[in-house]
Amino acid sequence: MSSLLTRRRLLTLAAPAVLLGCDTLGRAPRFHDMVLKTGEWLSYRSQRLLGSESLAREFDPSQMSPEFRTNGSVSGGSPAYKALLQNGFADWSLPVTGLVNRPLTLTLADLRARPARTQITRHDCVEGWSAIGKWTGAPLGAILKDAGVMPAARYVVFQCYDTLGFSPYYESIDLVDAFHPQTLLAYDMNDAPLTEGHGAPVRLRVERQLGYKQAKFIKAIDVVDNLAGIGMGKGGYWEDQGDYDWYAGI
Amino acid sequence: MTDEAQQSGTPGPGDLVRRHRLSTRLWHWVNAGVMVILLGSGLTIFNAHPRLYWGQYGADPDPAWLQIGATETDGVLILGERQFVTTGVLGKSTRADGKEANLAFPSWATIPTNYNLGLARRWHLTFAWAFAGITVLYGLWSLVNRHFWHDLVPERGELAPGHILRDIADHARLRFPRGLAALRYNILQKGAYLSVLVILIPGMILTGMTMSPGFDAMFPWLLDLFGGRQTARSLHFLFAFGLVLFFLIHMAMVLLAGPFNEVRSMITGKFRLPRERS
């Protein structure tokens, strides 16, 4: 009987000990970087190795969410953005710069004049919810081809108008996703121009990753060879602020 | 008498005999640790959006079949049309720092104990890879060393309704197998272990993969197998609580069957045969 009691006492002590142990380990930088980042590395490497060309499921119009909720920034924020919005984004233009042979500046009319792609896909939030919507936009790969990406290029960085906390939003993806046929600079959602809540005038669709990668209110595109100079160096707002995975394919 | 008896002939009651293979013992304990981490970090991830849906999509505007939330005063669990007050545990609970928090699962059950979705995902997805790895290794090895066929798959007579009912009646009266019969898994054990190994654990891994937009693109059949990402998310949650239920019954059985002997057999592999009832 006494052994049973000690064992039970051991169990009641063991459970909090495990949790507190995990808290301590999670705060230890070496454990965090050497152990807890392994999952992201394995997901990234395995999905690139075995499925870099695979397409995200495209759905039937009957499978679309009746209401597609907004999330994150629902406004572009700054007075400069408000001025663009009021003018129907006639004055908006998108510079494509960095490691490209021919830097571009695209107006919304330029984007709409390009060959377009429409896809009904599922948007997965890191929190766990999903919504299915219809997106129309210009494939990013064709734009990058026009700009002529240099051999040293590794990542495409998106600077945004919206501000979360004290910092403007930013995100980045690798060239596999940048040139993926379903990766769009989307200007229409559910057959109407993108609303402010969903990131007008243009947001990124990178369909094999989670919602926080789908940068809204895009202001500029920069092609780079590393992410060290972007924000705090981890490649995105939430990656820097919230320890989110840079590769959000899972 | 010790295990020499085994070599000299049939072991008798009171003898210490070999029971669990090294591969089973190793997998058992590594798996136990990994599952604790997966459960704790999984509860944190659930707390980010404590609503469950059926189908391909599901978000706040859509009907949830399960929801954990809070009113001004109470924590509530909402199952379909029914609402249960769960203050103190679900929806509203006290954090380690003594403050009241509107968390679906309480901070004392989550990894990390202070809500941090990014860090919880790192724990969860790193250990999910480890979990998938040891599951595949142990599964293959159990086929190779015939553990699966020899110890787990029921023999023909064991599936007879009469045999199963008798085993249920024996368990209900806490009459556990004695003597040599204690070395073999009985039919209820086989059923429990097989449902964990064949349904719950592969189910956890596959529904987990179905929640990944990247794996859905690579293996679109996952979406058809489960009927959508949100159904997969609901099943992931239900399978997880299936494993929690298994754990609770498993603990009760170990305690009732003799914890010292049972735990020893899972550590050293040696088991003392219980004496026959007189």
Image: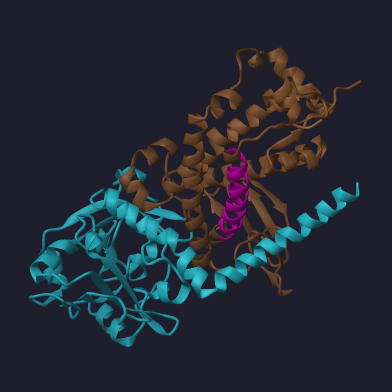
Chain colours: A cyan, B brown
Q: Position of residue B62 (x, y in %)?
A: 48, 52
Instruction: Please state if B115 lies on the left or on the right of B251 as rendered.
Output: left
Q: Is residue A133 visible?
A: no
The x, y position of residue B49, in whole percent, is 53, 59
Residue B75 visible to the viewer? yes
- Residue furthest to the bottom in view is A79
Q: Is residue A15 above or below residue A232?
A: above
Above or below, comparing residue B35 to residue B195 in the picture: below
Q: Quadrant of residue A211?
A: bottom left
Where does the image place residue B164, in percent across and percent down from the top left? Answer: 70, 19
Question: Could you say which is closer to the camera, residue B5 or residue A142?
Answer: B5
Q: Quadrant of residue A244?
A: bottom left
Q: Which quarter of the figure is the N terminus of chain B placed in? A: top right
Extent of the magenta region: B24-44
Helix, strand or loop: magenta stretch:
helix
- Tell me if residue A108 is in the magenta stretch: no
- Which of the two residues, B61 or A153, is positioned nearer the viewer here? A153
Residue at the spot 28% in from the left edge and 49% down from the top edge: A51
Left or right, B260 with reference to B209: right
The picture places residue B44, in percent across and down from the top left corner, at 58, 61
Total labels: the figure holds 0
Quadrant in which the C terminus of chain B is drawn: top right
Q: Residue at x 23, y 50 (%)?
A: A53
Q: Is residue B98 above or below residue B88?
A: below
Which quarter of the picture shows residue B3?
Answer: top right
